[in-house]
Image (tube, rainbow, N blue to C red):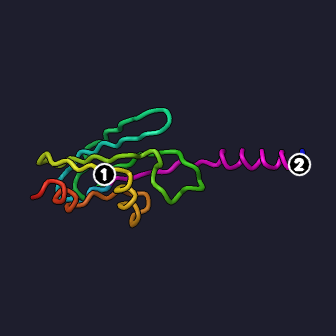
């Protein structure tokens, strides 16, 4: 019995202690600069990170810590991405939309011209 409990405790410590630092990326695939705000939500509350303006065809990074067992998902606390272009058009991506965008780019959210067209028309 002692061996089973010790083994279980060792596994729990190992799994909870295996976290790694990752880099998330927002890429601007539009022809103009954009401003981006990221919203992170977890059991400790909500935090907003306003990134530096992102020029056309460039990206901006942030780092986060996450279990190394979940390396194929972007930051689990990232709940919303808000991007605004020079015309004042703002798009808001919720977690489902973020996950869809990340499917093809793993740890990168790519903002496309079509996102602004869909949100604000021409």
> x%, y% of residue 55?
23, 51
Please give the count of numbered marks on the rendered protein: 2
Residue 46 vertical position relative to residue 112 in the rendered view, above or below: above
Residue at screen point 48% across, 57% down:
73
Question: How would you rate the neighbour count of disc 1 (Cα within 10 Å): few for under 14, some for 14-19, many for 20 or more?
Answer: some
Asked if residue 67 lies left or right of residue 53, the reply is right
> x%, y% of residue 42?
47, 39
Residue 82 vertical position relative to residue 70 in the rendered view, above or below: above
Of residues 69 and 28, the one drawn nearer to the viewer in this rendering: 69
Of residues 111 and 92, the one drawn nearer to the viewer in this rendering: 92
Q: Which residues are magenta?
A: 4-26
> x%, y% of residue 60?
34, 49
Residue 99 vertical position relative to residue 4 in the rendered view, above or below: below
Of residues 57 and 74, the one drawn nearer to the viewer in this rendering: 74
Location of mark 2 (residue): 3
Question: How would you rate the neighbour count of disc 2 (Cα within 10 Å): few for under 14, some for 14-19, many for 20 or more?
Answer: few
Q: CA distance from mark 2 to mark 1?
A: 48 Å
* On-image quarter of the C terminus: bottom left
Q: Do tag 2 and tag 1 residues touch (Cβ < 8 Å)?
A: no
Asked if residue 26 lies left or right of residue 24, the reply is left
């Amino acid at each position: 019995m002692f061996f089973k409990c010790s083994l279980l405790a060792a596994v729990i410590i190992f799994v909870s202690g295996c976290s790694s630092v990752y880099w998330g990326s927002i890429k601007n695939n539009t022809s103009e600069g954009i401003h981006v705000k990221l919203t992170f939500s977890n059991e400790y509350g909500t935090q907003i990170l306003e990134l530096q303006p992102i020029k056309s065809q460039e990206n901006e990074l942030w780092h986060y810590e996450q279990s190394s067992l979940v390396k194929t998902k972007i930051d689990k606390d990232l709940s919303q991405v808000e991007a605004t272009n020079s015309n004042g058009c703002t798009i808001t991506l919720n977690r489902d939309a973020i996950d869809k965008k990340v499917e093809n780019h793993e740890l990168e959210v790519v903002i496309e011209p079509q996102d602004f067209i869909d949100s604000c028309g021409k």
